[in-house]
Amino acid sequence: MTTRPKIIVLDDDPTGSQTVHSCLLLMQWDVETLRMGLAHDAPIFFVLTNTRALTPEQAAVVTTEVCHNLKQAIALEGIQDFLVVSRSDSTLRGHYPIETDAIAQEIGPFDAHFLVPAFFEGGRTTRDSVHYLKVNGIDTPVHETEFAQDSVFGYRHSYLPDYVEEKTQGQIRSSQVERFLLMEIRSGVGDRLMNLYNNQCCVVDAETQDDLNRFAADVLRAASAGKRFLFRSAASLLTALARLPEQPIASEAMAQYVRSGKPGAVIVGSHVKKPPSSYIGCCNNLARSASKLRWRNCLKNLAIRALPC
């Protein structure tokens, strides 16, 4: 097989597409809409399931429905090579393994599924299978942060094989998890990927975007050779898999894209304190440092409301 695999992303909240551009974000998942995503020129497309806002039972139902329709769409479009990504939180919150199990049940079998939670833009890295969050400049195991105390998705482990055992309630033991470490990723893991079978659970290190670029290149080669993989990842892996060109609109030109000059509303909500408080702090800093009238007017008209969850 020589074609590039289509990357299909089931996104559990609206932030998963923040590291890519020029691709489709689908808000519904009937067969015809999914066919449009599969037929689009971009190598990647997103289906916004928003399951992180749902109960475990609802998340399973929605994911199953999406994949049932996706299976039909894939057949109708004649797609042979594809990768499926269950995009979720870089601090390990979300409905794992409920969503990956539903995906595997509907459109499997897969040779392996990979946990790849690194998100470099947010200071999240994985080293020696331990997932870290940078707090005040210090890499801190995520189980020691407030995210692990989430009222819905709490957990006790930063060492990813132990996290898998915890979340699967022992169905996958820590000792059964394959670990892809930094030295291996940087030297190439193509042969190892070709020897994965039976939906083997794997966890992946990454400290830089280049680490994931190397890993993704090996994954894409293996997928083109017939391997079928499923991923549970944060957003940085999507950048590596998609290999999109540079953003066509420069960052400094983004300010001109304002709808008729009208004020906007930003609603921030989280199960933890950090995101809303960080956003409000950012806006306060802008207000203090604003030297241009248009910034002051923008901030004056911006409605900011942090919603506790």
Image: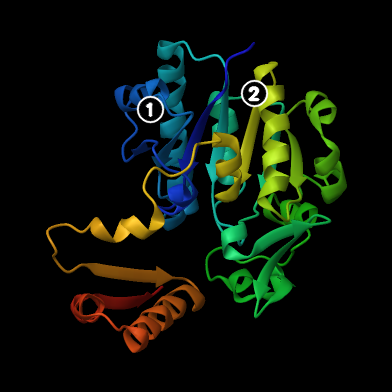
Does 260 sit above or below residue 194?
below
Disc 1 designates what residue?
A: 37
Q: Position of residue 118 (x, y in %)?
A: 65, 54
Q: Nearer the viewer, residue 163 or 41?
A: 41
Give the position of the N terminus as an image quadrant: top right
Q: Amino acid at mark 2?
A: Pro
Disc 2 designates what residue?
A: 109
Viewed as shown, does residue 256 lie left or right of 128?
Answer: left
Which residue is at 66% across, 29% downward? 229
Which mark is drawn over residue 155? none
- Quarter of the image for residue 220 reads top right
Task: Determine whether the residue tagged by mark 1 lies in a helix, strand or loop.
Answer: helix
Q: Position of residue 159 (x, y in %)?
A: 79, 60
Dot 1: few (<14), some (14–19), or many (≥20) neighbours within 10 Å?
Answer: many
Which residue is outermost to the bottom? 288
Regarding residue 137, the answer to whether it shows in the image is yes
Give the position of the C terminus as an image quadrant: bottom left
Which residue is at 57% across, 45% downward? 98
Rounded to the nearest whole Å, what is the CA distance between mark 1 and mark 2? Answer: 22 Å
Which residue is at 45% across, 52% downward? 18
Which residue is at 14% across, 64% downward? 261
Task: Determine whether the residue tagged by mark 2 lies in a helix, strand or loop.
Answer: loop
Identify the mark nearer the N-term, 1 or 2.
Answer: 1
